[in-house]
Amino acid sequence: MPSAALTIAVDGAARGNPGPAGAGVAITDGKGKVVQEIALFLGETTNNVAEYAALLCALQASAQLGAKELRVQTDSELLARQLSGQYRVKDPTLRVFHALVEQLRKGFRRCEVRHVPREQNRAADRLANRAVDAGLRAAAKPTSIPTPLQDPTQRTFRFDTP
């Protein structure tokens, strides 16, 4: 089991806004050892929703790991400032995500979310973009089309899978 305090890098990525999006989470223990990495394809959504989705994934994973204290870093100024109360959450969708985050944060003794420059958030950025790439590759694969077997009177179809 990891230490009770974890450092977490979170990032969301969307190609277009909205567009194909992913969430990336890199969780490390107090000694900097990688405990868990998450790359989650989200489908089509906005970058801000992807940022919140990454944080929600991080909080859930940290709770499952038994963490008591979290130091979360994000390169999203909007996310960090909304969670600190500096910015109001106006968008109705983000309000729902914000409420979920606040509820999950209560499960930890301490949960600090701070803004960092993009260069300091490369691990999470890499994971978020990996998720988008994987989602786009999966979507680009041709679907199986049923083709009749040799006997045209037969009602059975064969599915050729790539």
Image (spheres, rainbow, N blue to C red):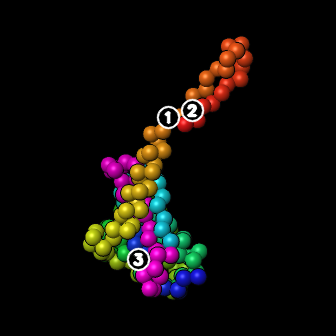
Magenta stretch: residue 23 in it?
Answer: yes
Q: Is residue 153 above or below residue 125?
A: above
Spatial CA span between label 2 and label 1: 7 Å
Circle nearer the viewer, 2 or 3:
2
Question: Mark 3 = which residue?
Answer: 72
Q: Quadrant of the C terminus?
A: top right
Q: Residues within 10 Å of mark 2 (few under 14, many from 20)?
A: few
Q: Is residue 95 left or right of residue 152?
A: left
Please report whichever mark, 1 or 3, sits nearer to the chain's N-terminal start: 3
Please report the bounds of the magenta region as a residue range: 11-35
Q: How many badges with numbers are in the image?
A: 3
| Type of the residue with mark 3 | Val
Numbered mark located on residue 142 in the image:
1
In this view, the residue farthest toward the top is: 153
Q: Quadrant of residue 66?
A: bottom right
Q: Is residue 81 visible?
A: no
Numbered mark located on residue 144 in the image:
2
Q: Secondary structure at mark 1?
A: loop
Q: Is residue 26 visible?
A: yes
Question: Could you say which is closer to the camera, residue 70 or residue 93?
Answer: 70
Residue drawn at point x = 28 percent, y = 68 percent: 118
